[in-house]
Image (cartoon, rainbow, N blue to C red):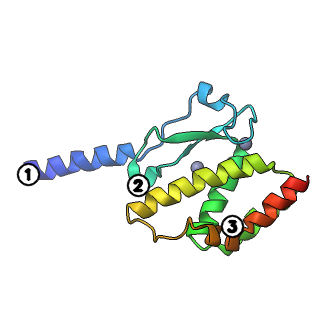
Amino acid sequence: MLDHWLDFYRLQKYRRSKIRRRPTYRERVTACSACGYPASHRHHLWDVAMHGENRVTIQLCANCHELHHLMYNALVRDSEYSRKLVLHVLFSDKVARETAEKILGWCLATIRYEANNGWIEQGRDAAAWVEAQLHWSAFQQRAERG
Ligand SMILES: [Zn+2]
Ligand SMILES: [Zn+2]
């Protein structure tokens, strides 16, 4: 009986830790770390579903946040839908090269961390893979020309 209740409380605690806390006003008015837009969301570099609420976050505006998730899904989850959206955004000439490079950098750091822990397969952060999926050097050259 006691064990039953201990398990019950453990489960409650576990569940609670998966709940995202509401972002504070201060966080919301923090500029986007990628593009500088004056309002942002917290993006968890360590996934909340896996790690619970944690402080390993970066502040991204809605657009950069979405691009980050789309890049991740294109590189890790083989989502063709996400990949096409990333290419559409990158080749729209609306995203600065430095902005996209920062977002990809965080994305690759997350992928490396997850791969090193054995949660996803290795190689999803490889330059050749990024090139094949996101046409990265073509984007950089295009952004260079302005
Ligand atoms: Zn942004
Ligand atoms: Zn996020």
Q: How dense is the environment of label 3, judged by Cα within 10 Å: few (below 14), some, or many (20 and up)?
A: some
CA distance separating discs 3 and 1: 49 Å
The mark lying in front, picked from 2 and 1, is 2
Q: Tag 1 or tag 3, which sits nearer the N-term?
A: 1
Q: Which residue is mark 2?
A: 50
In the structure shown, which secondary structural element does the residue marked by tag 3 occupy?
Answer: helix
Name the outermost residue toward the right: 146
In the rendered image, the vertical position of residue 27 relative to residue 129, given as above or below: above
Residue at 76 percent across and 64 percent down: it is: 137
Label disc, if present, on residue 1 of the rendered structure? 1
Q: Nearer the viewer, mark 3 or mark 1?
A: 3
Mark 1 residue type: Met
Question: Label 2 is placed on what type of residue?
Answer: Met
**What mark, if any, has residue 82 been given in the picture?**
3
Residue 63 appears in view: no
Instruction: Look at the picture and state if 80 lies above or below 2.
Output: below
Q: Amino acid at mark 3?
A: Ser
- Quarter of the view holding residue 120: bottom left
